[in-house]
């Protein structure tokens, strides 16, 4: 039986958020055992300039078949499966290097948008069937999450056997970064959503 090599990434803390829900979920999801899947985990910098380099180093190190990238989407009330990454950086919030881009392209010679090469609708349906609030999102934003996702999908164009998807996560209940009135989700639900995505994707790959 062929083993699927999976890379899960989450982000470091940033701005005034002392804990990043993406990294908490990444660590817990990476510990989930799935037959036929080996899992590596890497923390990504919240840096427009360095996120792409960090991802490429991780891919060179682990040679994954699939990359599942996690990011924090404070205020969201659902797990969001991201369909597209845009060739653009723009933010009012500086990254951890203090950089605030103003409508700058990621790569002047690359497509304006790239789409996930994973079956996003079937993955979303599998998560929804287990009662986890989830939706497909058509905007990954223009912060470092989008920058990382675009880099991953460029890597998939270079290595067509590799697949990638980005998943945005809410604050979890008890999250120290949660602001008053912001939506939260049980941590166990978010972890379970990623586990379901891994299981569903592995099952589909075995059928190919």
Image (tube, rainbow, N blue to C red):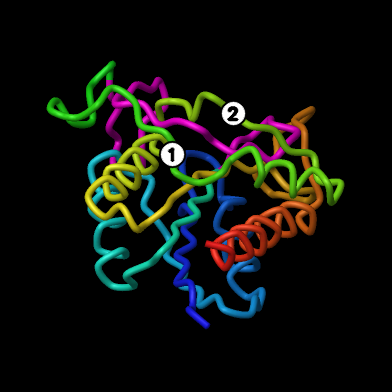
Where residue 134 sits, quadrant-wise, is top right
Mark 2 and 1 residues: CB-CB less than 8 Å, in contact?
A: no
Q: Where residue 93 sits: x, y (%)?
A: 42, 27
Q: Where residue 69 sits: x, y (%)?
A: 48, 51
- Of 22 and 124, the residue lying toward us: 124
Whole-angstrom CA distance, mark 2 to mark 1, is 13 Å
Find the residue positioned furthest to the top: 103
Count residues near mark 2 (Cα–Cα under 10 Å), then give few for <14, some for 14-19, many for 20+. some
Find the residue positioned furthest to the front: 208
Where residue 171 sits, quadrant-wise, is top right
Left/right of residue 148 with respect to residue 117 in the rendered view: left
Residue visible at 60% across and 59% down? 204
Q: Where residue 12 sits: x, y (%)?
A: 46, 54
Q: Where residue 45 sits: x, y (%)?
A: 36, 52
According to the image, label 1 marks what residue? 145
Left/right of residue 96 with respect to residue 21 in the rendered view: left
Q: Count every numbered label the image shows and give the total.
A: 2
Q: Earlier in the sequence, mark 2 or mark 1?
A: 2
Of circles 2 and 1, which is in front?
2
Q: Secondary structure at mark 2?
A: strand
Q: Is residue 142 above or below residue 156?
A: above
Find the residue positioned furthest to the right: 131
Write down the region rendered in magenta.
72-101
Task: Tell me the number on the disc at residue 137.
Answer: 2
């Amino acid at each position: 039986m062929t083993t699927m090599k999976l890379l899960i990434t989450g982000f470091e803390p940033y701005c005034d958020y002392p804990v990043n829900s993406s990294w908490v979920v990444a660590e817990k999801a990476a510990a989930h055992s799935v037959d036929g899947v080996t899992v590596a985990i890497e923390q990504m910098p919240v840096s427009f300039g360095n996120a792409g380099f960090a991802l490429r180093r991780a891919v060179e190190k682990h040679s994954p078949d699939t990359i599942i990238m996690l990011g924090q989407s404070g205020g969201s009330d659902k797990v969001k499966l991201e369909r597209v990454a845009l060739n653009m950086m723009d933010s009012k919030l500086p990254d951890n290097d203090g950089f605030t881009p103003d409508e700058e392209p990621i790569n002047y010679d690359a497509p304006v948008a790239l789409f996930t090469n994973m079956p996003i609708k079937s993955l979303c349906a599998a998560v929804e069937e287990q009662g986890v609030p989830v939706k497909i999102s058509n905007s990954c934003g223009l912060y470092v999450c989008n920058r990382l996702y675009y880099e991953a999908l460029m890597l998939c164009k270079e290595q067509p056997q590799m697949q990638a998807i980005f998943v945005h996560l809410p604050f979890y209940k008890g999250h120290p970064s949660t602001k008053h009135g912001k939506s939260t989700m049980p941590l166990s639900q978010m972890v379970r959503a990623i586990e379901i995505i891994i299981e569903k994707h592995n099952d589909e790959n075995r059928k190919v």
